Structure formats: C-alpha cells, structure tokens
Image: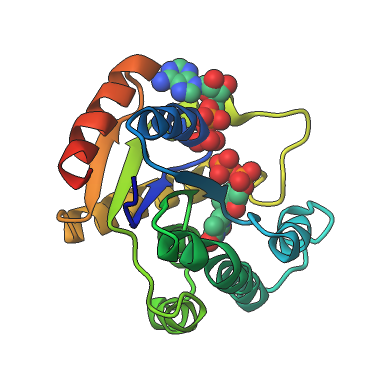
Amino acid sequence: MKKSLFITFEGIEGSGKSTQIALLAEYIKARGYEVTVTCEPGGTTVGEAIRRILLNPEFAEMDYHTEVLLYAADRAQHVAELIMPALNKGNIVISDRYIDSSIAYQHFGRGMPLDLIMDVNDRATQGLKPNITFLLVVPTELGLSRATQVKADRIEQESIEFHTRVEAGFQELAAKEPGRWLVVDGTRSVDEIHQVVVEALEPFL
Ligand code: ADP
Ligand code: TYD
C-alpha cells in the first residue's frame, strides 16, 4: 500500500529512538506499507562523510557556525537524495532526528541564533516538515548512561548542563506545536512506549 508520511523521532542520546524506530518499522511493514528508515547525521554516502567530521572528538575547535552549516548540509543531501524520493514513491519515511535536533542542540544547547538555524534549514529541507514527531523524554543522566559507548563522540562529550538545555529545548518545541509532536515518557518499558507510539500513529495510517 502507498502512503506518503514523514515521521521523525527526537530526544537526547539514549532516549530510545533507535529501539522504537525498529519496532515501529516492523509494525508499519506488517500493516502492508513500504517503509524507509533513516537517520541524521548520515543516511546517505555524502551524509556519512559529513557525520564523521561532525562527531569526530578530535575536532574540538569546530566553530558553532560550522557545526550548524554541516548539520544543514547533511540534511540537504538527506532530503534531496533519500527522503523526498521515498515520499514521492509513496513510502512511509521514519528518520532518527531531523531539523528539531538542530534547534535543540545548536540553538538551545549552543546558543546559536534561532533565525540563522531556521533560515539555513528552510533552504536545506526545501521546506519539508514531518507529519508527526515523537519526543522520547528521559532524565539527562539516564539517557547519557544508556548511550555511553566505549568512546563518547564530540557531542556526547558535552556537559550534563548542555544536554539538559537540549532536553528542555525539545520540550519547549513540542509544547509550541502540539499538533505535530507526541511527547512520550521514555522511562517506561520498550513495549509500553511502542504501544503509545502505535496508537498515536493509527489515525495517520
Ligand atoms: P537512541 O537511539 O535514542 O540513542 P537507543 O534506542 O539506542 O537510543 O537506546 C539506548 C540504550 O537504551 C540501548 O541499549 C537500548 O537497548 C536501551 N533502551 C532503549 N529503550 C529502553 C527502555 N524503554 N527502557 C530501558 N532501556 C531502553
Ligand atoms: P548519534 O550517534 O546519531 O546519536 P543518537 O543515536 O542519539 O541519535 O549522534 C548524533 C549526534 O548529533 C547527537 O549527539 C545529536 C547531534 N545532532 C545535533 O547536534 N544537531 C543535529 O541537527 C542533529 C541531527 C544531531
């Protein structure tokens, strides 16, 4: 079945986005729809190369303008090469992060001007907005402890205060646009969260 629908998942690292996306993709497939699962930064070959620059902990000197523009460059490629073509084919697209991550991390986290981020991202995305965005809310310490890998990447290395500003930023965005966002308690079990996500999505299917 064909259904052009753009779903995004947002939240701090370790909030459970990839876990829920995998379950949701299976659910959508079982309902008979074609689904494209992707993520930012990355999702395309060019995006993977940009991702390696963005997350490299050796690039501590990266200017915040550079950071904003690289995330937007990754997104431009992602929208043009993957997301728009998939939606045009009638696929449901699920992306692990999108423009709201730039607002939460680069505006609320880094303090970069919102109008700069909106301007470059409006151009990068050709105005494409998600139909529905799930925000998985977990306390910062819990998310970061779940996300802890062998070596933290350039963004994960930031302070607890930085990640707490990002989390508060996500919640502010969700409160401003309740028609698009669904805020989910990410401390519940994987299955409970999946049920909430599926119920919220049902009217769109
Ligand atoms: P993200 O993609 O947001 O970084 P992940 O889905 O990779 O998060 O989850 C990070 C870690 O937390 C993984 O080890 C995952 O198994 C675990 N996890 C995910 N969701 C839950 C949950 N609801 N309860 C407990 N652990 C979870
Ligand atoms: P990733 O390993 O994909 O984290 P996660 O599994 O939590 O999604 O790393 C992506 C990192 O990039 C993450 O720390 C959030 C950050 N980020 C931004 O700062 N701005 C953005 O626009 C995007 C898409 C991600």
**Residue 201 visible (yes or no):** yes
Task: Residue at 71%, 29% (x, y): give it.
Answer: 149
Task: Give x and y (percent) for residue 43.
Answer: 63, 54
Give x and y (percent) for residue 175. 19, 54
Q: Answer above or below: position of 99 versus 192.
A: below
177 lies left or right of 47: left
Q: Is residue 169 above or below residue 157?
A: below
Compared to 107, does 4 lie above or below?
Answer: above
- At horizontal 47% and vertical 42% (from top left) the residue drawn is 12
Q: Which quadrant of the view contains residue 54?
A: bottom right
Q: Nearer the viewer, residue 31 or 180?
A: 31
Which part of the image, by quadrant, shows the C terminus?
Answer: top left
Q: Does the image show residue 108?
A: no
Q: Nearer the viewer, residue 60 or 202?
A: 202
The residue located at (42%, 61%) in the rendering is: 87
Figure quadrant of residue 173: bottom left
Q: Give the residue furthest to the right.
A: 58
What quarter of the picture does the N terminus occupy?
Answer: top left
Q: In the rendered view, does 33 fall on the left or right side of 204?
A: right
Model colouring? rainbow
Residue 200 percent across, percent down from the top left: 20, 37
Residue 114 percent coordinates (x, y): 39, 76
**Looking at the image, residue 89 lies above or below residue 125:** above
Q: Is residue 48 left or right of residue 170?
A: right
Residue at image location 49% in from the left, 74% down from the top = 112
Nearer to us in this view, 91 or 106: 91
Number of labelled discs?
Answer: 0
In the rendered structure, the answer to whether residue 193 lies left or right of residue 164 reads left
